[in-house]
Image (cartoon, rainbow, N blue to C red):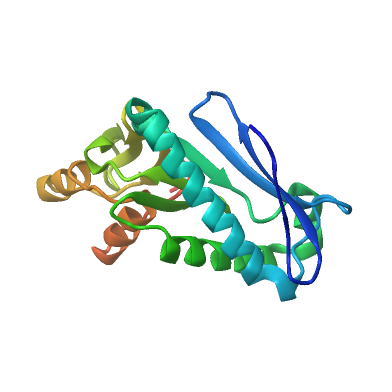
Amino acid sequence: MADINFITKQGTEYVLSFDKLDTPDNIEVSFQTKEKGFETTNKGEVFEVMQIITEKVKQFLEKFKQKYPKKINDFELYINPISEENEGDLGYTEKNKRTQLYIRYIQKNLNPTEYRVELLDNIIAIYYNTPSDINYKIYQIGRSPQGNSYRVDYNKGSKNIDDIWIMYQDLDKNTIKYIKNYKKGIESLKQELINKGLKVNNTFKWLNY
């Protein structure tokens, strides 16, 4: 895929790339300054750069949908606002702030009826919004006097995207049905379950009693 060059009002030249990952339907978006490489976007240019990148991503998504309409259920596009080269320089808090800034802007400027935007470990993931393709499967993985334990798989079609774990807490039939029929992203489901009083883990974690 051809790189896209653009110049900000301050005169910084950027290179925007759309690269295939493990399959042609998995795309990674990266951007860097032409002279200095993967440096952190200058604070004075952040909004301008976000605007340009979001517009180019929208154009790419539209062209892909038109060219490969049968592949949109398998499509995934990833944007990492922070490169590996400068993750350490920014620090955890600043890295999260920068990522949240990008995802809010992208969510605001992509039509939610057409696209779904999610945050996966500080990586922004964009999917075509095909709610019927989202499905959750729940498995009981253990039983103990403290309660049952479950793994909830978040799938897009037949592909597992992520999972959450509910340890040592018995779920009633209505909650299990609610999880299986949920049609939004996994972070949204996690918050809904927390609101119901459940403790939810992002990783597998046995407790010692």
> Which quadrant of the figure has residue 51?
bottom right
Say which residue appears at 81% left-offset and 66% top-offset: 11
Looking at the picture, how far across and down is residue 186, in whole percent?
36, 49
67 vs 49, nearest the viewer: 67
> Which quadrant of the figure has residue 87?
bottom right
21 vs 66, nearest the viewer: 66
Quarter of the picture containing the N terminus is top right
Count of labels in the image:
0
Looking at the picture, how far across and down is residue 124, in whole percent?
53, 51
Is residue 142 depicted above or below 191 in this figure? above
Say which residue appears at 47% left-offset and 51% top-offset: 58
Left/right of residue 205 with respect to residue 147 in the rendered view: right
Looking at the picture, how far across and down is residue 139, in whole percent?
28, 33
> Which quadrant of the figure has residue 165?
top left
Is residue 60 depicted above or below 45 in this figure? above
Taking the image as drawn, is residue 124 in sight?
A: no
Q: Which residue is most to the bottom?
A: 44
Looking at the picture, how far across and down is residue 20, in whole percent?
60, 30
